[in-house]
Image (spheres, helix red, strand yellow):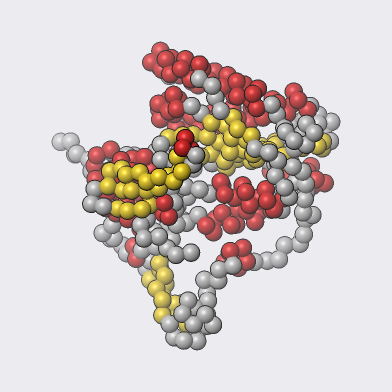
Amino acid sequence: MQRPQYEVAKIVDRFGQLYVDTCQPNSFIVRTLDAIQKCRTSALGGHVDYCDCCGEQRISYNSCGNRHCPKCQGAKQALWVDDRMSDVLDCKYFHIVFTVPGELNQICLLDSKLFYKTLFNCVWSVLQQFGYTKYGVESGAICVLHTWGQNLSLHPHIHCIVPSAGMTLAGNLKRITKNGKYLYPVLMLSPTFRSILLKKLKLQLKQGSQVTKYQTLIDDAWKKPWVVYCKPPFGNAQQIVKYLGQYSHRVAISNHRIKNISGSDVTFFYKDYRDESRVKPSTLSGVEFLRRFCMHILPRRFVKIRYYGILSSKQKDKTKSLLAKKPETKVKETRQERIVRLTGFDYRLCPVCKTGFMHTVELLPKIRAPTNVLYVKKELSC
């Protein structure tokens, strides 16, 4: 795949300091932008490689590895999918999406870490409740948090992959579904999810003495119909894992969606779902683009992929009989060998002659005082 001409790193390089001066983000967001800006540049160091066949010399710079960096997710996603392949159960899976209405965005911004944690808890509470009431079992779920819409607006929602199996109170595995076509009644999921989440949010606002200020938003959200979407069951286990991998390591925007970066604006493509998913361009100022992008930088150490019920690590031993792929003796591989096997791309192969292999002949250290650094300017008091 050809590398995109424009990248989020270039946007940070051009507008990052202006955004920091204008919006005064916290230090964690600044460090994240700083990592994205330095990714695969001389600031992080690297190595010089030499081909043993044609003599080609190449300089490769290190990646930042940040989970919000558009350039650092491909290998992580491939490894995560490979790990999940051994855990897939031999049953149908359903894709359920829990979406939060825009009226709650202001409450989300008060304390995003608490809001997202509450959102995860409420989603699993709903799934667990329906598992017991409809089938008498505790089911499971892999839940992935996304916080963005196509135009980088704040749009918190959770993607859930739910197996059509569960564990009874007696500890026995049981297959579930209604005629194999649907799992839970969607028209009942939506009001139940709305009720549980709004009650918890209102309780949290009461504890912070802010319920009066945001009561109108709570009332508006309660009157609005909520969306819980459920897709039909998937095919085999491989399709399930690959499908889930599309959602596991996404970031707010990929570099391939960025069309142009001018002296003051950024233009990118987005899908307009209100207009039959047509792809349209959108232009924002550089500062506004980074402000929206930074809304989707998750709090430090926040876990965005969570496993519940029979898909959690606690239940692995009890679900072995239902595994789609029987456990095998794993061949010892290095991380690089796994990436080559999964992606088909061998970074050691010479890009020029396609025959020789590249060997590292020199290590390049990090630059101790790089010029591309973002700083939060603070006024010193006497």
Res 166 visible: no
Name the residue located 56 percent from the left edge and 22 percent from the top edge: 194
* Of residues 300 and 246, the one drawn nearer to the viewer in this rendering: 246
- Residue 224: give x, y in percent of width and height: 50, 20
Q: Quadrant of the C terminus?
A: top left
Single out the residue that lies furthest toward the top.
212
Res 269 visible: yes
Name the residue located 60 percent from the left edge and 57 percent from the top edge: 79
- Residue 381: give x, y in percent of width and height: 18, 36
Single out the residue that lies furthest toward the left.
382
Corner quadrant of residue 162 = top right
312 on left or right of 296: right
371 on left or right of 60: left
Name the residue located 35 percent from the left edge and 57 percent from the top edge: 6
Name the residue located 36 percent from the left edge and 60 percent from the top edge: 5
Numbered-mark total: 0
282 on left or right of 89: left
- Residue 108: give x, y in percent of width and height: 44, 29
- Residue 12: give x, y in percent of width and height: 32, 51
